[in-house]
Image (spheres, grey):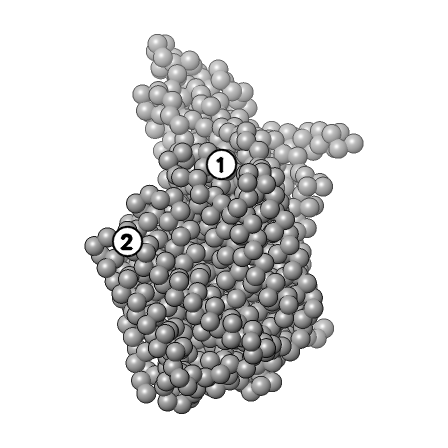
Amino acid sequence: MNVEHWGLAVAFVVLGPLLGALLAGLDRRLTARMQSRQGPPLLQPIYDVLKLFEKDTVVVTELQTLYLWGFLFFMVISGFILFLGSDLLLSLFALTVSGIFLCLAAYSTNSPYSNIGSSRELLLMMAYEPMLIIVALGFFLVADSFRVSDIVAGSPWQVVQLFGILLGFLFILTIKLRKSPFDLSSSHHGHQELVKGITTDLSGSDLALVEIGHWYENTILLGWLYLFFAPWGVALALPIALVLFFAEVLVDNTHARLKWATTLKATWVVTGLFGVTNLMLLPLIT
Amino acid sequence: MPLIALLIGFPLLAGLAILFAPTHARRADLVRWSVYGLGGATLALALSYFRMEPQFFALGEGVAGALDSAFLLGGIALSVYLLFACRRIKGREWYIPLLILAQTGLMLFAELAPEHPEVARQFYVDSFSILMALIVGLVGGLICLHAIRYMQDYQAHDLEVTDRRPAFFFMLFVFLGAMFGIVFSNHLPWLFFFWEVTTLCSFWLISYSGTDEAIRNGFRALGLNLIGGVAFAGAIVWLTHGPGLHTWELDQLIAAGSTLALIPAVLIAIAGLTKSAQLPFSSWLLGAMVAPTPVSALLHSSTMVKAGVFLLVKLSPVFHDTYAGLLLSLVGGVTFLVTSLAAVSQRNAKRVLAYSTIANLGLIVMCAGVGTATTIWAAILLILFHAVAKALLFLSVGTTEHLIGSRDIEDMEGLVYRRPVLAAMMLVGILGMFLAPFGMLLSKYTCFQAFLTMDVMPGDGILLAAILAFGSAPTLFFWSKWMGKLVAMPRRPNPIEAAIPRDEAIALFTLTLITYVACALFPLADWMFVQPYTEFLTGAGLIPLTDDRIPWETIAMMTAMLGGIFLLPLIFWLRPPRFAVVSGYLSGANVDGSASYRGAMGAEREVESRGYYLTGFIQEDLLVRRGLIGAAILMTLMLWSVNP
Amino acid sequence: MSFLKKSPWILHYAATSCNGCDIELLACLTPLYDVERFGIVNTGNPKHADIFLVTGSVNEESRKVVENLYAQMPDPKAVVAIGACALSGGIFRDAYNVYGGIDQVIPVDVYVPGCAARPESIIDGIVQALAILEERARDRKRQRKVVAS
């Protein structure tokens, strides 16, 4: 635990959302280009959030804001732990808690659309949680530690050893980023049967908190992806991670939404097939 | 030693006093004072043996002999009573009297053997048993306190049930006394006697209402627990007549290690599995739901099921690094996975709690089977957190049931607004059950690490870790969705008029406080109760020394999270944001706020939306049946693996 | 400067439109016009929206819905009526069930004529609404300061 780590962790708290916002902006622009549109400016997500703070906030229940604070708080904690080079498993648990708080915010408004959104969000969490845990377990078996700083300093072959787990992680990354075919709980596209799902009844600064939370989440997920390639050094690992991250945009634009049962089954099958098998075979590929 | 005698004897005397109390009010007072007395005695015990090495007590020749005969006669009397109760069995329950006879026969065969082992030290106290005693004394006591008013309402509500409250409270206290016996006995046949007393009490309490359903479920509990009893008696016979180990002392059994003690340990483990309602024996705990809620709370949190896992964790060093231990862990794992999934499909709050209890015990059994310092550490903390959080949840569900007249989770919608304090207590219970940074999580965290470093056969730890990963996901789902119902804004004002009775309020408040403090100060609980125990075990060379303590910054982060959970509501309460309130979104068709909308043909319709129970995806019957078969096969393998 | 100008989110509701104007409105989102260039997003949710676009005349069935949606939009907000029917009831104005234009029910800021209104004029209408929004945002800010002090 040295100054560098603390610096990185504090940098995450300050700059993390900016990076996440840029990722989101790039995402929107890429999507537009894939649909032969010009798309919004790169900083559009930031404009959106600044606008949301200018707007009034209307709530169904005052408590919903409290749950959103919880969402943001645990999201920041999760990233803080990750960038501090501390415990990966703990970071994952904090991420889960944060997700649950978002669901609570939506549940508390108790409108049918928010209810469907949050129930589906929980369902998706149930789907991807095992794979996320297995990612952490895989790193543990390779680097012999749950500590991010040990994983970063691990063997350059770890991505080969964990290849199945990487595939499984990319699969659930689609869910975590709420991309088609898994955008069951809340979609980037308006006008559909579940309206905005989990964020339907959030507005103004409440919605802005959710957006900022998602920026943090983008950065955290990019961090997780980066970990696979981390031993190769920033110059090589970061571009690879970014390319894989934006490969999700392509998936988003080429798939239609799946039903929840299919999503759950598919995710667990992938988790078993790639994740658990990879763990089992790990002793053979050291 | 006097304290132990007091703890075992006092509940019995208190129970007798309550049984013969002249009036209801008098009895209620007696229950209250006994609960306070019991709590005080356990605290005194905890203080006087604070962080001590295990202390053993030898009774004088005469006393020991007298107690020996007393327990022998008591055991026989117990069997006779059970046989007498069997007059009400029906066709498919024919095996129950046979099991009673088998068990009594085995015990007599062991105890009347001319050269049975001599027991030098009949009782002991170590920090683990102190923790158990605290759970039994405080949590169990609070449940008894809660029961006073609950039973009054229960009887007033259900006039067809004969009022047998004096006997009811007698049984509750005997139950607590027997639990103290289990956690302090070093003398295996005596321990077995206390074990059987808990079986009897649970049978009586489950059948309390006297309906046919209650009686059938009582017999099911009896039958399944007797299977464990027979296995336990078998272990004692093995220790008396078998080759190798020849002892009746628990500490010597544990110290003998896996080469000598594995066979009796596995037999006792089966008894532990039945008592802690693991698959394939789990059905009795769900059946026990017909009993009044305090009984469920008692069975689920502080007594009965905890007796099972207590023994398993005690025997854990014997299972370390053996196939039998691995298979035991797998039985726990299958139970954890299956019942976590099954809980998702339940709407009845008590059934959700029941399945989650079985699942959590499964997790403890997984830890016990691995048997390293870390897993024992995790298992003990799980026992603590589960006991307090689950007792709190059961009692708050019971209180809610009396207030709103339903135990359906969907009917608890908006409890945060309708009964803020009660809902907050329930939320603390739920948070304590599964959410970071509370108790469960800690144990899961250490389990992953411990599983991955175990080494019985290739891939074993990964299998266990994968089971844990897959089983945790549904846990998250069903708890969160329950919380979602609690925090939901009611669409119409729907206040609850009735007040929470004082005894129930005291019990609930204290349990909430204990849950919160246990979570916040877990390093302290660890230092006081768990460390001395694991250090003793490693010091005695019974379990390997491992160096996988949780690093300080992890604990610091957890503390930060816990602080956040406490501070955020505080800040919110001090500086609430003032936002305009509007109705929920109903596609603009709102008629009466969020409550109704204008539907087809201009008709006003009520808004209804329910939680996801995935009943099409998770078929409870099928799932549990498969789990049952799987666990039965694993258990058979476990028995076979110790084949001499 | 107000960021409302850079990110106007719209809510589109067809009161009793023949769908002609709706199709033109949706055409604005297509690659040809691509209004997302200006940060315009069709949210389909009043609680997220800044500009309320209504097509078609108001009748008994849609009156309450228009009112509800308008009420659920957080301030500052603006309303744009699109097409002849939304302006005045159009050819349906004499029908027994029609109230007339949108301004019979909620205050309208910008009127976009046409049957159907062309995408260019719709975009122009939104741009005009932006100026109104910006002013309201300024007023709102001042109001908040007054309330705070």
Mark 2 or mark 1, which is nearer the start of the sequence? 2
Tell me: residue B474, above or below residue B583.
below
- Left or right: where A182 falls relative to A235: left
Task: List the residue tagged with mark 1.
Answer: B153
Q: Residues within 10 Å of mark 1 (few under 14, many from 20)?
A: few
Q: Residue at x 45, y 28 (%)?
A: B595
Of residue B492 and residue B423, the one placed in the foreground of this image is B423
Measured as percent of width and height from the top left, residue A256 is found at 33, 51
Quarter location, residue C134: top right
Measured as percent of width and height from the top left, residue A135 is found at 46, 70
Q: Decide if residue B580 is in sight here.
A: yes
Q: CA distance from mark 1 to mark 2?
A: 31 Å
Query: Quarter of the image containing the C terminus of chain B?
Result: bottom left
Of residue C136 and residue B180, the one placed in the foreground of this image is B180
Whether labels 1 and 2 belong to a single chain: the reply is yes
Q: Tell me the chain of label 1.
A: B
Q: Decide if residue A26 is in sight here.
A: no
Question: What amino acid type should be assigned to the residue bearing mark 1?
Answer: Asp
**Callout 1: SS:** helix
**Callout 2: SS:** helix
Q: Residue furthest left?
A: B91
Q: Residue at x 29, y 58 (%)?
A: B623
Measured as percent of width and height from the top left, residue C85 is found at 40, 19
Q: Which mark is residue B127?
A: none
Q: Which mark is residue B87?
A: 2
Of residue B531 and residue A33, the one placed in the foreground of this image is B531
Q: Tell me the chain of label 2.
A: B
Question: What amino acid type should be assigned to the residue bearing mark 2?
Answer: Arg
Q: Residue furthest right?
A: C149
Q: Residues within 10 Å of mark 2 (few under 14, many from 20)?
A: few
